[in-house]
Image: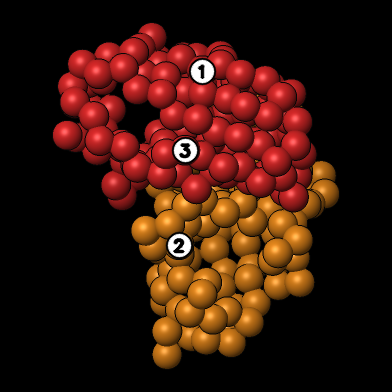
Amino acid sequence: QVQLQESGPGLVKPSQTLSLTCTVSGGSISSGGYYWSWIRQHPGKGLEWIGYIYYSGSTYYNPSLKSRVTISVDTSKNQFSLKLSSVTAADTAVYYCAREGSGSEYFHHWGQGTLVTVSS
Amino acid sequence: DIQMTQSPSSLSASVGDRVTITCRASQSISSYLNWYQQKPGKAPKLLIYAASSLQSGVPSRFSGSGSGTDFTLTISSLQPEDFATYYCQQSYSSPRTFGQGTKLEIK
């Protein structure tokens, strides 16, 4: 059973870069066939898809965040990461990592989520 | 981007009720529509994929229908554990987008 686990600082200062890592267990990112996504949820609000990466390194970012987002993958560690630059209080949210199948286009597996607060 | 609009935004119902939630896409998405259930403090859980396919392990009282732009999620007989927030999500194109959610509350 695939499991995803987010990790990273829970507090980030305004204008700095938010960095999170998702560690995958029970399956290999490098086996292909899946897109690895980041999704966030502002407090009390709905879900916003940030972007995804394929094991090959190809990415797609939400245009609304594209100028500030970088998603990368480390297949040797079976991890993928999110960097969001120039953060403001509006980036305070619970950040989830999730897996979507190629040909099975739905988010079947999710991490438990991690709250990141942007505050000085 | 494809906009997803759910209705209602909130709904009060009783155990045993039949409930229907609607999701409308701003353009045709064929059957690339998924439904999730989210409880407070938890990650969303996949209920229905490809508009009408029941995810393994999800009770059969949940069902989905629709294609094109209009979709519905139906719970045939509400159980206490079904009180949660429900989201639709399109996977027809990127960026992936979600509806704003429907909060199902106990009457």
Image height of B60 relative to A37, above or below: above
The residue indicated by pointer 1 is: B64
Residue B96 drawn at (x, y percent):
67, 44
Question: Is residue A6 visible in this depiction of the protein?
Answer: no
Residue at image coords 57%, 54%: A48
The residue indicated by pointer 3 is: B7
Sequence order check: which comes first, mark 3 or mark 1? 3
The residue indicated by pointer 2 is: A42
Q: How is the image coloured?
A: by chain
Residue at image coords 41%, 24%: B20
Image height of A93 relative to B59, above or below: below
Residue at image coords 17%, 34%: B107
Subunit that carries the residue with mark 3:
B
Q: Quadrant of residue B30?
A: top right
User: Which structural element holds mark 2?
Assistant: loop
User: Which structural element holds mark 1?
Assistant: strand
